[in-house]
Amino acid sequence: MRTLRTTLLLVSAVLSLTGCGDLANQPLLEGIVRGRVTGPVSPDGFVLFRQDPTVRTGIASDGTFELLDMPLGVGELYIVANETQALRASFELQPAAVVDFGELAPQAGAWLDLEVELEEDELNADVVVSLPGSPFLELPVNQLETLFRWGPLPAGCYEVVATSRVLSASETEPFCVAAGETRELEIEFEIDD
Amino acid sequence: MRAALPSLLLLFTVACAAVSDGTKGGLRPAKVSASSAEKAYASRRFAVAIGISDFQDSEWRGLKFAGKDAQDVASGLGAPEKGNFESVTLLTGAEDTTRNRILQALDALDRAASRPDDVVVLYISSHGTLARDHSGQLKRYLVTSDAKVRDVANTALAVETLNARLNAFRSRRRLVVLASCHSGSGKSLLPPDVSRELENTKAAFFARPLEDVSRAAMLLAASDWGETAREDETLQNDIYTHFLLQSLDGTGDRNGDGAVSAYEAHDFARRRTYAFTEGRQRPSAEILEVGADPILLAGRIQRTGRPELYSYAPNLDGFTLKVDGEERAELPGGTSVRPGKRRVELTKGGHSLFDQDISLNDGERLPLEELLRTRTHQRSVYLTAGALGFLDAGSRNQVMPTSPAAGLALRWADAPLKNFDLWVDAQGFGGGREISPVANASVPFRYRLLTVGVGAAYTWRFDRLSLYTGPRVAAVWLGRSFDLAAYSGAQSYFTASPGWMAGLGFALTQRLELSMQGNMLWTYVVTDGTGQSVGFSGAWAGMGYRF
């Protein structure tokens, strides 16, 4: 059996020497998403891929944006046009295709006022709080009461997640906001027994 | 069994004691002289010569020289300076040439010639005739002394019966010489009803019965079908027999090897009979067993003979054999030539069927039909259509789906070795296809695919069918080009891979052949920098032209 395997490996090695060129499917597994935000655009405006918030790009002064090397499948953009306007846009990307949203009209952004409360013995639990699919990720909570004000948020449903990096504990709080709405949310962080 | 056991043990003990001289086992030299050994292993020659001149039924007219023919043949074959046969039985009188007596003589001949390499010669000079047998088929008969014109099927000796008896002989070297004919004239008489029938249906007469081509030995006939075998007053013999006997004194030794083979004797007699009768009588030969071990009628092979070219194939009948531009023989027949490279040509009516330089060695006997067949079938070119594709679904989805293919294939028969065919093929195609790099998504692309293969296949050849299989090495080149919104580019990959092929061919005509082949390669494909061994197969069907 070992001899057979060795033979197969040797033949494969010889065969590999006889081959040249390369076939690449990787370019087919990516795509481009682009569009143009109408209305006033702040230099701080940005577009973020909600499924992987590290993928983000800025918005040009004419409102155009383009995300390269986007993974295939269904996804959603998180767009902040200026200090008061934002929107979310869904898409489905086919192999090596371009999704062009055309013109996108941002709406009044929503705001989330979040209060996270810890117990005394949780102060050293390295608790962080995130809003997945947004730029607000892993923000530290190191006081008994910590206030966050996040916005402008595109209208839609979200989930606030508070996690201890030291202890196996997390709190999840889903919520939905409408355009222009300000929402208050309170999380009391409790460590599981 | 229990009673026999002590006897067997005793026999075993005695046998062991008989070979024991104090040492165990080993080979013991036997005192046998070289001449005794040569004699013991030399092939023996036996003959029966039958001449039927007189017939009980007066409606068969008597033959003048049939008895003398048989007598002369017996003398020629038995003479030490000519045939030097071990035994020659002569049957000539009316009593000795009845149907039963002849069949008894054949049985005796089989008993005497008990070795496969013994030579058996049966010579019959008589009338030939035709009659319908019990199933209504027209068959050839030899008229025995007791044969009745009105009841040929039951009283004469059917050539078919003669063949069946000879085919059952233990000897594998059998020669039958029929100094008779079945034309209704000369040395042939036909019953009145057959004569009347043949007058009206001449075609049926000229059609050769099945029996004439269904044996595996040599049958020499003094005349071809529909021709007349003649006796001649000047020669005092059947004409063909006269020249056949003449060849035995060494005159017929065409290749100079010291012996006169049946082929040589027949060719000698055939040419002279044809010339003597000014083309009216063409002795024929039916030879289905042709080998390098000829039936010798006179002398012994003392040296390697000159190369010989010959043919008795009916399809070459009437062709002229030219060697180095010189006319050497009219086929059927043959000639011997000097060894070396010779220009061999077959022509008929100004048309050249074959013209090629052939290297010939001493002792070589080359049937021209074989030369023609080999030459005709040596190379083939096929126009093919089929499909190429990966064996695994992953590669079909990721690299390229199964693709149609068209191309050319070339075959060299018996190259590099006998029964091995060399194959060279090129298949390719191009067009638009789709792959699925991720589930439920397809990507259109254009491709070009080319494979070039070389293989050597062992080939089994049957009548029209040939089957082959063997190793094959192929180069595969694949080019893909994409023109998509987010990616445009061309890619290519080349690899050489070992594999195997198998196929079959079916000859439609001498020139055209249908062929199918399947092949498989064990190839190595690199995609996105990662290589893997995968199976790649092809299948095609094609029409081939032999040249």
Image (cartoon, rainbow, N blue to C red):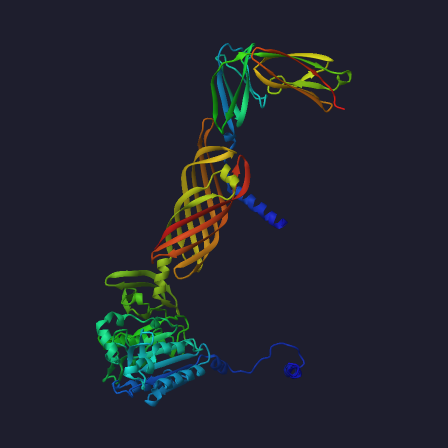
Q: How many marks?
A: 0
Residue B92 location in percent, x, y?
33, 88
Quadrant showing the C terminus of chain B: bottom left
Question: Measured along the vertical axis of the image, is residue B75 above or below residue A140?
Answer: below
Quadrant showing the N terminus of chain B: bottom right
Residue B495 vs residue B392, the one in the foreground? B392
Find residue B106 and report its image quarter: bottom left
Q: Is residue B259 visible?
A: no
Find residue B356 and report its image quarter: bottom left
Q: Is residue B140 visible?
A: yes
Seen at 50% across and 12% down, the residue is: A61
Residue A120 location in percent, x, y?
77, 15
Residue B88 vs residue B397, the one in the foreground? B397
Residue B287 location in percent, x, y?
36, 72
Question: Measured along the vertical axis of the image, is residue A31 above or below residue A121?
Answer: below
Seen at 64% across and 77% down, the residue is: B25
Residue sitting farthest toward the right: A121
Residue B370 location in percent, x, y?
36, 64
Residue A172 vs residue B428, the one in the foreground? A172
In the image: residue B272, left or right of residue A66:
left
